[in-house]
Amino acid sequence: MFYANIILILLSTLIIIVLSSMLMTKMQNIRQLKGEIDKLMQSLENMDEQAKIIVRADMELNRIQEELDKKISGLYALQKLSHNISTTMVEEEIFKNLSHELFRGIGFEKVGIFHWDSLKKEFIIKSSLGYSEEEINLINLYINSNKDRTLSFVVTNKTLSSISTPENFADKKRLRDIFKSEYFILSPILPKQDNRGFIFAGTEDPDTVITSGDEELIKILATQLGQALENARLFEKTWNAQQELEKKVAERTQELTAALEEVKKASKRKTDFVSSVSHELRTPLTSIKGYAAILLTGKLGALPPEAKERLEKINRHSDELGHIVNELLDISRIESGKVAMNLESCDLKSIVDKIDDLLSGQLKDKQINLEVKLKPGEFKALIDQAQISRVFINLVGNAMKFTPAQGKISISAEKKEGMIQVDVSDTGCGIPADYLEAIFEEFFRIENSINQEVKGTGLGLALVKRIIEAHQGKIWVESKAGSGSTFSFTLQQAT
């Protein structure tokens, strides 16, 4: 019995030891499981935090994307608005081209554009969106009841908005109520001159968020609108000035045309008068010269030396007067177109050689050298030989009168764009600058000591000018007092 109790005690002890061992093993397993559960909970907490971060990041990205899309849409709409207002130079058309749809594209369903009328001394609404007629009348009444303050605000060129203007700003709530907008932007239009105004853009949707980017867009639009109005004003001013100028030009042209007709009539009367008088002078001149010639022959009896001397003076002066009459007739005939130029191809060298031969005696007496710088066949012009010969005789003759002994006269030419330019130069006394334009006028003579000694009518250069112009050419002179002169004229080159 004793042994049985001992065995029982041993078995109980053994069972307790085994159970204790199993309990310890389970406790250890529980601790391990608890550690793993703690780690898992920590991981789950980390994953939850990361999920929250991801969700927040995704929401922020979506917000940024929406903001970016809105800015792109706003810029696109602004570009269209800018294009619309810049395609016209008429003020009213500029306001008409402000499309309401484009404003909606920026994100505003309430828009009012006001312009200061300097004549009426009040603000006029030029364009609106989202308002009834009654609401527009109330807005107009409010704005013009406070027009001095509104003008002062416009001049400051500061933008008011629901995001950048402090909440305690006195007019902020009033603007919200009048314009029926929860969020708004009010930006001045301030061109360089009198075209002042402002843009109001707003929304009554409390879920619509207006950003600084929206404010910047409206400010840019206001600036561009101001520039467009300034351009329109300048264009209108320029257009009016142009119309006024065209009117004055038309009136002046009409006056000048009438004056030109009077000049033409006066010129024709002068030409007819000179022609008539010259013809009338020819008959008595012919008679005077004829009777003087008869008396000088002695057929009517011998004459005393004194009478013969006076008759010779009469004869000589009659020749001079006849020469003047002939030149006057030639000028009047050329002016009236009664003298036809028989144009033909001719070598200028051959004509100049004949003039050289004709005037050689006078050149020798005056000890003046005539240098001809033309080669045979080099310069062929389409001319009337007889008339161009008169031109050379007059020009060389004039040069001889005013060139001192041992002086030189030269004749040269060059080809220029289908024309031949002929230059007749001398080493004479020259012509003062004040007389260069007048020397081709009829009867004009320079008042100097040489002209007092040299006889002349003042018709030679006038005749030369008419002949050259009848050849479709031009004539001019370059000279300086004391340094000689160069008379130049152009002729058509013969083909």
Image (cartoon, helix red, strand yellow):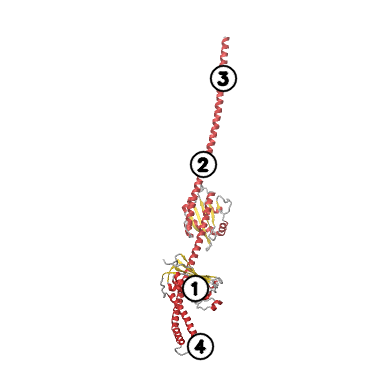
What percent of the width, then of the height, locates residue 296? 46, 86
Residue at label 3? 21
Label 1–label 3 contact, CB within 8 A: no
| SS at badge 1 | helix
What percent of the width, then of the height, locates residue 18? 56, 18
Q: Which mark is residue 59?
A: 2
Closer to the N terminus: mark 1 or mark 4? Answer: 4
Label 4–label 2 contact, CB within 8 A: no
Mark 1 residue crowding within 10 angstroms, few (<14) / some (14–19) / many (20+): many
Q: Is residue 408 above or below residue 283?
A: above
Q: Which mark is residue 370?
A: none
| SS at badge 2 | helix
Name the front one of labels 3 and 2: 2
Residue at label 4? 305
Q: Is residue 165 above or below residue 483?
A: above
Q: Amino acid at mark 3?
A: Ser
Closer to the N terminus: mark 4 or mark 2? Answer: 2
Figure quadrant of the C terminus: bottom left
Closer to the N terminus: mark 1 or mark 3? Answer: 3
Closer to the N terminus: mark 3 or mark 2? Answer: 3
Give the CA distance from mark 2 to mark 1: 103 Å
Q: Amino acid at mark 2?
A: Met
Q: Is residue 84 above or below residue 264?
A: above
Q: Amino acid at mark 4?
A: Pro
Figure quadrant of the N terminus: top right
Q: Which mark is residue 396?
A: 1
Give the CA distance from mark 1 to mark 4: 37 Å
Mark 3 residue crowding within 10 angstroms, few (<14) / some (14–19) / many (20+): few
Q: Is residue 18 above or below residue 175?
A: above
